[in-house]
Image (cartoon, helix red, strand yellow):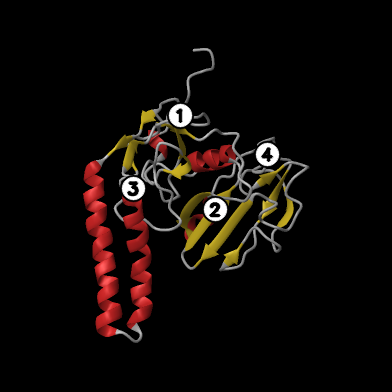
Amino acid sequence: MLLRGRRSPDQTEVRRDLGLVARRALVGGSFAAASGALALAVGGWAWALAGVLAIPAAFTLASIRRPFVAPCPGCGSLLGASLVQLPDEPVLGPTVHDLRCAACGIYVDASGGVVREAPFRRTLESPGFECVLPAAQLGSLAWGADCVRCGRPATRSLRLSAREAGVLSGLEATLDGPPDGAAPGYCDEHGAADDPMARALVVARTPGRVTVQLSLYAAYRAFLDANRDLVDVTVRSGAVREPPPIGD
């Protein structure tokens, strides 16, 4: 159950899906066969394409050893059921941290075979909790009233770079705006460094797309809930419930 501003209370169980073994073996084997055919039969320039196909083949076949699935504790979508596995995608297992649900966007942990949403207090060494959105929506984002680095009330905000491509939260960004929620907010202690890693925020723009990455999970979750109708997730804002008052 997705709650706005509070960790989802539900938990689900990891189970082994033996059918996933066969499906991944078929898909991974197909990639491997295509890679080998290109390398042996065509040669030349096709070696490069063969190498590209070999990457998902290797990781998909390796993931056969962990054919685990579990419902997302936030939205119920099945986690871990993807057939093609890529190098930057964690594989669900009895123990895994920071696995993103592609349907609702929350991050989950599995510990002892039980899946729960990641703790709000978690802070990554570098920004990694990620949202993607169309570039046209960048100016419509709601950033909230708290510091994206620590979660305390913001006293100032970061004016992002206006460049058409590249990192918008780095050297060209200026920390001189009022904390109005229309730009990333910072408290008096954070945000002054020019490095996006130190700012715990990466806003990167490519033609047509913007990627937002945050270090503090509480800041990510607040940003996600405030912008569900703008970012690329399936579960929209209407499906997020207001939490009951504490004590009920």
Residue 78 seen from this side = no
Of the image marks 3 and 2, the number of the one nearer the N terminus:
3
The Cα–Cα distance between marks 3 and 4, rounded to whole angstroms, is 38 Å
Would you call the spot at circle 3 few (<14 residues within 10 Å), some (14-19), or many (20 or more)? few
Q: Which residue is mark 1?
A: 8
Q: Is residue 41 above or below residue 141?
A: below
**Residue 52 spot, x, y in % from top left:** 37, 71
Res 17 seen here: yes
The answer for how far apart the CA atoms under marks 1 and 2 are is 22 Å
Instruction: Label 3: state its secondary structure.
Output: helix
Q: Earlier in the sequence, mark 2 or mark 4?
A: 4
Residue 247 position (above or below residue 52): above
Query: Counting other residues with Cα less than 10 Å from the Cα at mark 2, is it few (<14), some (14-19), or many (20 or more)?
Result: many
Reading the chain from its start, which is encountered first: label 1 or label 2? 1
Disc ID at residue 212: 2
Three-letter code for the amino acid on which mark 1 is drawn: Ser
Residue 67 position within the rendered picture, expressed as x and y whole percent measured from the top left: 31, 44
Classify residue 102 as left or right of residue 187. left
Mark carried by residue 93: none
- Label number found at residue 65: 3
Residue at disc 4, secondary structure:
loop
Residue 235 x %, y %? 37, 41
Gap between marks 3 and 2 measured at Cα: 32 Å
What amino acid is labelled 2 in the image?
A: Val
Q: Earlier in the sequence, mark 1 or mark 4?
A: 1
Q: Secondary structure at mark 2?
A: strand
Residue 12, x across and y down, in percent: 37, 29
Identify residue type, mark 4: Cys
Q: Earlier in the sequence, mark 3 or mark 4?
A: 3
Q: Which residue is mark 4?
A: 150
